Each structure stands twice: as structure tokens, then as C-alpha cells.
Amino acid sequence: MMIRGIEHLTLPEIEREIESGGRFVYYEYCLSLLVVSTRRPSVIYFLRGDDWGLVRGLPYSLLSFCCGWWGLLWGVVWTPLTLFNNLCGGCDVTPEVLAWLHSREPEDEGPETRNPPCDAS
């Protein structure tokens, strides 16, 4: 799972940020070409409490606004949906990402059990 914005944060730091208003979101974009349309999610972004989700979603909104309308039926349906989601700050997936991060956290074990010695035989 690709998450932007948590590169140098530990799990307790992320949880403190979430308590102060942080959240994990993704944005959507729609691309269309006459009879073919696609609606895709972006990577997941970590927004701190003082970050505006609207600003991060602007590139995806502009892409959808320029290239999403051109598909018959689905381009016309999906483009307003993606614009609405992005302009509202993105789709919040904080509980799911936190559960995933907790499942990936290593158990608090001693150093001898984390890196067992190599068996040279």
C-alpha cells in the first residue's frame, strides 16, 4: 500500500496526528475517450490536522474536469462524482489504513528473536 506523508513518522506519532485532526484520504480521477471511461483512485495521502484536503485533490480534479466528460454515459456520470469527492477533501479511509498499519507493526520482542542467527550448516 502506497501512502504519502508518513515517511518519517512512527505509528505513535501518526496516532497523535490523527487525534489532532489528521486523516488518511485518497482522491479519484476520471478519464474518458468516447465509449471508454475509467474512474480510478489515487495513492493514499496522510493529511495532518492543518492540511487542506482540497489543495491536494486539485490535480486530480483538474484532470477529471478536462479529460473525464468525453465518454458516453459513464464519463458524464463519473466526472461530477469524482469532482464532488475531491472538492470535499477526498475519501476518508483512516480506520482501514490504521488497521493495516497496526497489522504490519512488529511485535515488541527481544533483539535475539527479531534477527535469529544464521545457520551456516
Image (tube, rainbow, N blue to C red):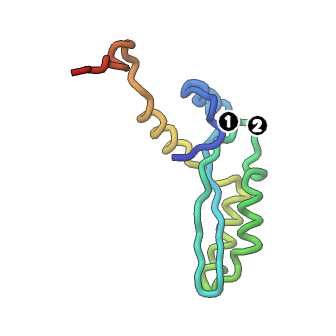
Position of residue 90 relative to residue 38, above or below, is above
* Image x and y of residue 17, in percent: 65, 30
Circle 2: element type: loop
Count of numbered marks? 2
Amino acid identity at mark 1: Gly
Say whether residue 116 is left or right of residue 67.
left
Amino acid identity at mark 2: Asp
Position of residue 20 relative to residue 86, above or below, is above
Of the pair 33 and 30, the residue shown nearer to us: 33
Separation of marks 2 and 1 at Cα, in angstroms: 8 Å
- Please name the residue shown 63% across and 29% down the image: 8
* Image x and y of residue 37, in percent: 60, 78
Tell me where residue 20 sits by quadrant.
Answer: top right
Q: Quadrant of the C terminus?
A: top left
Q: Could one spot residue 40 in this view of the protein?
A: yes
Circle 1: element type: loop
* Image x and y of residue 45, in percent: 64, 46
Which residue carries the number 2 mark?
Answer: 50
Lower position in the chain sequence, tag 2 or tag 1: 1
| Contact (Cβ within 8 Å) of mark 2 with mark 1 | yes
Say whether residue 117 is left or right of residue 28.
left
Label at residue 21: 1
Of the pair 61 and 43, the residue shown nearer to us: 43
